[in-house]
């Protein structure tokens, strides 16, 4: 994507029309997005869907993942029809497995240093930031990470961060949410014999008409993320 095209492109599409319609056509560029939810709620799949859509539109993407090796990431995304192998081989997509727990107190600082050295990237995804929060010496270091990330966005880079909401102090998560331009909340609930997954669009800068919207979704092998009516999701 050349610079003039990037200037015109103000939205990061997920590549999924049904999902985009719930996101006010997509996420704004140069934004900080928080994807929050419990374990198994679908945070990684949603982040992968959005980064795949960004790659389809010609954006250059980097992923810092504590959830996968590069091999397992490619295999998992291929299983839900999100093939990134060609983008990886061409250098349009970079993936960095990270062991934040092993970095201990230095995890937030080391992660941000790696992010700021990603030259020529349009979108950076961190999946997930939970281990960094768990090992940070104090809340100030966590807030400092998000403040510096916001400054990175002001330089033209979009950032998506996923985290397990239950691992964060309620006051701290409140501050983090307030700093983000977009806030998506995923939930996974047992309803009788079925597991119901929902996505709440809590906030998206410039897209007030979708704020608060709640939709159900499934993740199907060979198909990917499929939005379904909330009434159907809950049976």
Image (cartoon, grey):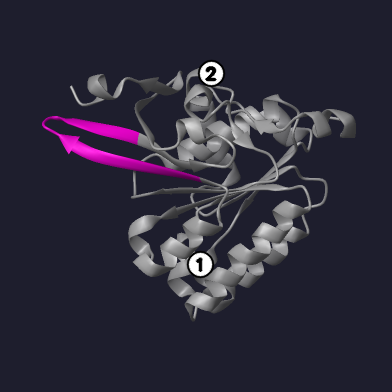
Left or right of residue 187: residue 10: right
Q: Is residue 215 above or below residue 145?
A: above
Magenta span: 183-198
For disc 2, the neighbor class at 10 Å (few under 14, some 14 to 19, many from 20) is: some
Q: Residue at x 59, y 23 (%)?
A: 15
Q: Nearer the viewer, mark 2 or mark 1?
A: 2
Q: CA distance from mark 2 to mark 1?
A: 33 Å
Left or right of residue 121: residue 105: left
Q: Which residue is mark 2?
A: 17
The furthest residue to the left? 192
Q: Residue at x 76, y 36 (%)?
A: 92
Residue 129 can be seen in this image: no
Q: Residue at x 66, y 60 (%)?
A: 149
Q: Quadrant of residue 169?
A: bottom left
Q: Which residue is mark 1?
A: 132
User: Which of the marked residues, 2 or 1, is nearer the chain's N terminus?
Assistant: 2
């Amino acid at each position: 994507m050349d610079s003039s095209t990037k200037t015109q492109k103000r939205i990061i599409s997920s590549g999924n029309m049904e999902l985009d319609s719930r996101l006010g056509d997509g996420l704004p560029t140069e934004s900080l997005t928080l994807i929050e939810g419990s374990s198994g709620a679908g945070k990684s799949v949603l982040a992968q869907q959005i980064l795949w859509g960004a790659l389809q539109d010609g954006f250059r993407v980097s992923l810092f993942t504590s959830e996968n090796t590069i091999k397992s990431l490619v295999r998992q995304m291929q299983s839900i029809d999100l093939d990134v192998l060609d983008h990886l081989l061409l250098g349009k997509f970079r993936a960095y497995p990270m062991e934040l727990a092993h970095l201990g107190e230095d995890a937030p600082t080391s992660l941000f240093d790696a992010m700021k050295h990603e030259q020529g990237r349009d979108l950076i995804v961190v999946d997930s930031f939970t281990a960094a929060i768990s090992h940070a010496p104090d809340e100030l270091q966590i807030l400092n990470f998000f403040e510096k990330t916001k400054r990175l966005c002001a330089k033209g880079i979009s950032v998506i961060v996923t985290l397990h909401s239950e691992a964060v102090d309620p006051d701290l998560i409140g501050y983090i949410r307030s700093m983000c331009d977009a806030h998506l909340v995923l939930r996974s609930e047992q309803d009788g014999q079925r597991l119901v997954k929902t996505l709440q669009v809590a906030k998206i800068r410039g897209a007030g008409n979708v704020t608060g919207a709640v939709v159900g979704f499934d993740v199907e092998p060979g198909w990917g993320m499929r939005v379904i009516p909330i009434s159907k999701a809950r049976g």
